[in-house]
Amino acid sequence: AQKITQTQPGMFVQEKEAVTLDCTYDTSDQSYGLFWYKQPSSGEMIFLIYQGSYDEQNATEGRYSLNFQKARKSANLVISASQLGDSAMYFCAMREGRHNFNKFYFGSGTKLNVKP
Amino acid sequence: EAGVAQSPRYKIIEKRQSVAFWCNPISGHATLYWYQQILGQGPKLLIQFQNNGVVDDSQLPKDRFSAERLKGVDSTLKIQPAKLEDSAVYLCASSHPIRDSPLHFGNGTRLTVT
C-alpha cells in the first residue's frame, strides 16, 4: 500500500485565490509527522510546514496551513492568497519511526499552476 | 547555518560509464539520505545513513550503485556502470536528531545518461 497518496497530478488556481492540495497517508504508528515541500522548476526542495500526529491544532506558517484530519488520515495543504511564485510541484511527506531511525515517505506530487 | 552541499550540479555521461556524487550535510545532522527523483515523480529513497552506518539500503540497486559515509560526515554515491534509466536528479538530504526535524535538501545533481 502507498504510504502517501496525492491524487491531484495538476491543479490550476487564479492568483489571489486559495487552493487546497490533497494528501492522505497510511500508517499504523501512533507517533508520526507530516510535512509539505515545494519544488520550483529550479529543483530545490523547500520545506513549508510540519504537523505532528499529537498536535491538536492545525499548523500554520504564513499563507500556508495544514488541514489535519487524523481520523481520515488526511493532511491537506491550504495556500491562501495564491501568488504567481507559488507555481511549483508540491510534495506531501510522512515521517515514521523511532527517534534516531526516522524514515520519510513522499507522495507523487501535485503540480500547481497559478494563473494571473 | 550552511545548507546541504552537493556537487556536481549537472553531469552528462554515456551509458556504461561511471559517475560519483558528493554530499556534505548540515553540521550536526547525524542522518543523511540519498534520494533519486525521476522527472515527474516524488523522491525515492536509495540509502539512509545514521552517522557512518547504513540504516536502510533496501531500494539501492546494489549491482551498480554504492554509497559510503566513512567519517560520519560527508558522503559519496557512485553508479557503475550507468544505465539510461539512471537519468534523474539525485538529492541528498540530512536531518537533525530531534524527532520532528524536517529533511533539509541540497540542490541536487541532475544526471543525464546518453
Image (cartoon, rainbow, N blue to C red):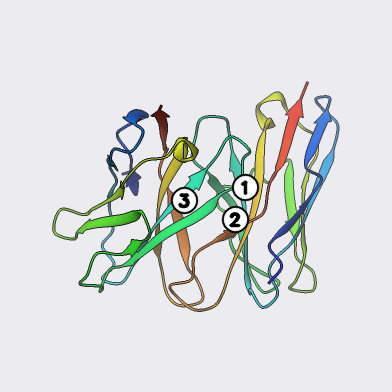
Residue A29: mark in rendering: none
- In the image shown, does B54 or A92 lie closer to the viewer? A92
In terms of image quadrants, where is residue B74?
A: bottom right
For the residues marked 2 and 1, what is the alpha-carbon distance in whole angstroms? 5 Å
Mark 2: amino acid: Asp
Mark 1: amino acid: Leu
Disc 2: which residue: B57
Q: Could you say whether the residue bearing mark 3 is in a helix, strand or loop?
A: strand
In terms of image quadrants, where is residue A42?
A: top right
* In this view, A59 is above or below A43: below
For the residues marked 3 and 2, what is the alpha-carbon distance in whole angstroms? 23 Å
Q: Residue B78, position in %: x, y? A: 78, 47
In the displayed structure image, the side of residue B60 where residue A57 appears, left or right: left
Residue at (53, 62) in percent of width and height: B103
Q: Residue B6, position in %: x, y? A: 75, 53
In the displayed structure image, the side of residue B70 where residue A71 appears, left or right: left
Mark 3: amino acid: Tyr
Residue B60: mark in rendering: 1
Total numbered badges shown on the rendered structure: 3
In terms of image quadrants, where is residue A32?
A: bottom left
